[in-house]
Amino acid sequence: MQKIRSYILPIAIVLGLLLHEYCAKFSVAVPYLIFSILLLTFSAVDVRKLKFSPMFVWILLFQVVVSIGMYSLLIALGARPVVAEGVMMAALCPVAASVAVVSCMLGADRQTVTSFSIIGNLVISVVAPAYFTLIGVHPEMSFMASFLSILKRVGVVIGLPFFVALALQLWLPKVNGFLSRYKGLSFYLWSVALLFTIGQTIDFIFLHGEGNWHVILWLAVASLLFCAVQFALGKRIGHKYGDTIAGGQLLGQKNTAMGIWMANHYLHPLASVSMAFYAIFQNLFNSWQIWRHDRKKV
């Protein structure tokens, strides 16, 4: 299986493109898949020893400052709001719930990436409602209503598996040990989640893209640029703190399913297209990284 895993993500993307109508019907399963991925990931780490790194501060500062900064700059330059919103989401979108899967395959410290996957999502769940209240399509929605809505989604998907893993480690260590032996399955569950997410977003493009192809093109270009910049900058930040791989993945690998959901609910729905393209670009890059890493081990 190790020889073919670098091809699994591109295969999931291609199938999502070709079978988007069918894959979109299964998008409701994505949160459950992410929950399972995280539970398997957290079970392999002593969650009582999660650690904080100064690297987290720089990554979060980039997400929080650059996202609203680029939105404000593009609006000032006369760009269409939907493009500005899509660019903002490319930076603001929280780290992927499955970041530990690829990061650890590439040699990153599991506790570092697991710690940030929790901290990063919780921080963005606080910041995002404030931004959406100011610029979103639902200005009548209060900060607290937006905050609770997003926190509920993030909390169930991100927080609950953390507390389940903690409870298992404290009171049912044998069950936790059993789950930790199958942590490798999280990569394949993630591939299935990617298949359904790509299918959902591509289906949205086909349904609502007519007459907006120039906007979609701008969103695609912006997603590619931000994907490249965030992986490169993240690696530089990570190198400074002794974990280049972790830095690149924590800033570059986004929870695109979460980003698509937030854009659909609080911004112009077409802005979610930026995260659809981002999903394609980041997973192609991750597939290349896995392929290169596996070749070095041969």
Image: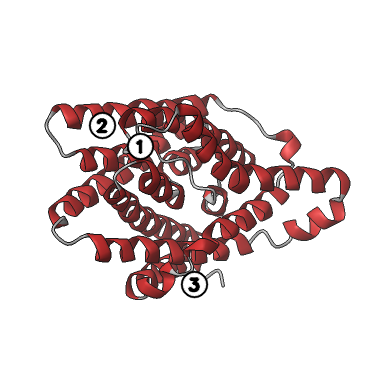
Q: How many marks?
A: 3
Q: Quadrant of residue 289?
A: bottom left
Please name the colour scheme applied to the rendered image: secondary structure
Q: Amino acid at mark 2?
A: Tyr
Q: The N terminus appears in which quarter of the rendering?
A: bottom right
Q: Which mark is residue 60?
A: none
Residue 134 at what x, y percent from top left?
Answer: 34, 27
Residue 108 at what x, y percent from top left?
Answer: 55, 44
Dot 2 corresponds to which residue? 71
Identity of the residue drawn at 18% across and 48% down: 218
Question: Which of the two labelled residues, at mark 3 and mark 1, occupies the earlier sequence position?
Answer: 3
Q: Secondary structure at mark 3?
A: loop
Q: Amino acid at mark 3?
A: Ile
Question: Which of the two labelled residues, at mark 3 and mark 2, occupies the earlier sequence position?
Answer: 3
Identity of the residue drawn at 26% across and 30% down: 70
Q: Which mark is residue 138?
A: 1
